[in-house]
């Protein structure tokens, strides 16, 4: 499971000319679900994202999490995070989970975040959406649930 996490001052999602969800200060999470993803991937990313210390403290240092500031989240499903452009000019999406597998995992991620007490707005799964993001910083973080299995230090860093 892949996520693009953006710290925002405000954000909203529009579907068919109607606002589907809007938040103030918080995070927009563009969430891509791969063919091999399981609920454990959603659990990992939900916990990781709400605890990422990317909001400023009193000294102006990125030292506060979404939980600590009581911010909001706007979660948007985005299968295009699994685009492969290795060959040719047209992206391939074979690594993205099909909708019948992806949507339950997307909803599972949202429920895990809601269990923390945070407000979570969301887009409409599979719909064409207009997402308005007022990126604060800008701060944008890329996460992949499979990274939790990688060693913390590579041999190249030694």
Image (cartoon, rainbow, N blue to C red):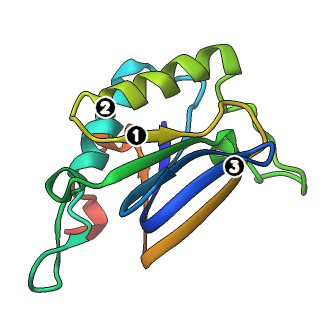
Q: Secondary structure at mark 2?
A: helix
Residue occupying the far bottom of the picture: 59
Residue contact between numbered discs 2 and 1, judged by CB atoms under 8 Å: yes
Residue appearing at x 89%, y 51% in the figure: 90
Disc number placed over residue 139 in the picture, else none: none
Q: Are marks 2 and 3 in contact (CB under 8 Å)?
A: no
Residue 88 position in % (x across, y down):
90, 54
- Residue 31 appears in the picture as rendered: yes
Q: CA distance from mark 3 to mark 1?
A: 15 Å
Label 3: state its secondary structure. strand
Q: Residue furthest front?
A: 18
Query: Residue 100 versus residue 10: which sits nearer the camera?
Result: 10
Q: CA distance from mark 2 to mark 1?
A: 6 Å
In this rendering, the answer to whether 141 lies above or below 119 is: below
Instruction: Name the residue tied to disc 3.
Output: 14
Relative side of 27 to 19, left or right = left
- Residues marked 3 and 1 touching at CB (< 8 Å): no
The spot of residue 40 in percent (x, y) is 34, 23
Which residue lies under the disc numbered 1? Answer: 120
Badge 3, how many Cα within 10 Å: few under 14, some, many 20+? some
Pointer 2 residue: 114
Looking at the image, residue 68 sits to the left or right of residue 74; the answer is: left
Examine the rendering and report whether any part of residue 151 can be seen: no
Determine the residue located farthest toward the top in the rendered image. Answer: 100
First along the sequence among labels 3 and 1: 3
Identify which residue is drawn at 36% across, 63% down.
25
Query: Is residue 84 depicted above or below 89 in this figure?
Result: above
Disc 1 on helix, strand or loop?
strand
x and y percent of residue 87 in the render?
Answer: 84, 51
Quadrant of the image for the C terminus?
A: bottom left
Which of 54/13 is in front? 13
> For mark 1, does the 10 Å Cα neighbourhood hold few (<14), some (14 to 19), or many (20 or more) residues?
many
């Amino acid at each position: 499971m892949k996520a693009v996490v953006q710290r925002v001052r405000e954000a909203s999602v529009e579907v068919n000319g109607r606002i589907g969800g809007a938040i103030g200060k918080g995070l927009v999470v563009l969430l891509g679900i791969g063919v091999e993803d399981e609920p454990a991937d959603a659990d990992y990313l939900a916990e990781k994202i709400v605890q990422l210390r990317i909001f400023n403290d009193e000294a102006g240092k990125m030292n506060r999490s979404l939980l600590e500031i009581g911010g909001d989240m706007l979660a948007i499903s985005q299968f295009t995070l699994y685009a492969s452009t290795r060959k040719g000019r047209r992206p391939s999406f074979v690594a993205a989970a099909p909708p019948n597998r992806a949507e339950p995992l997307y909803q599972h991620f949202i429920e895990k975040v809601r269990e923390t007490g945070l407000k979570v707005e969301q887009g409409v799964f599979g719909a064409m959406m207009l997402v308005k993001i007022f990126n604060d910083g800008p701060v944008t973080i890329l996460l992949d649930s499979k990274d939790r299995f990688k060693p913390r230090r590579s041999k190249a860093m030694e």
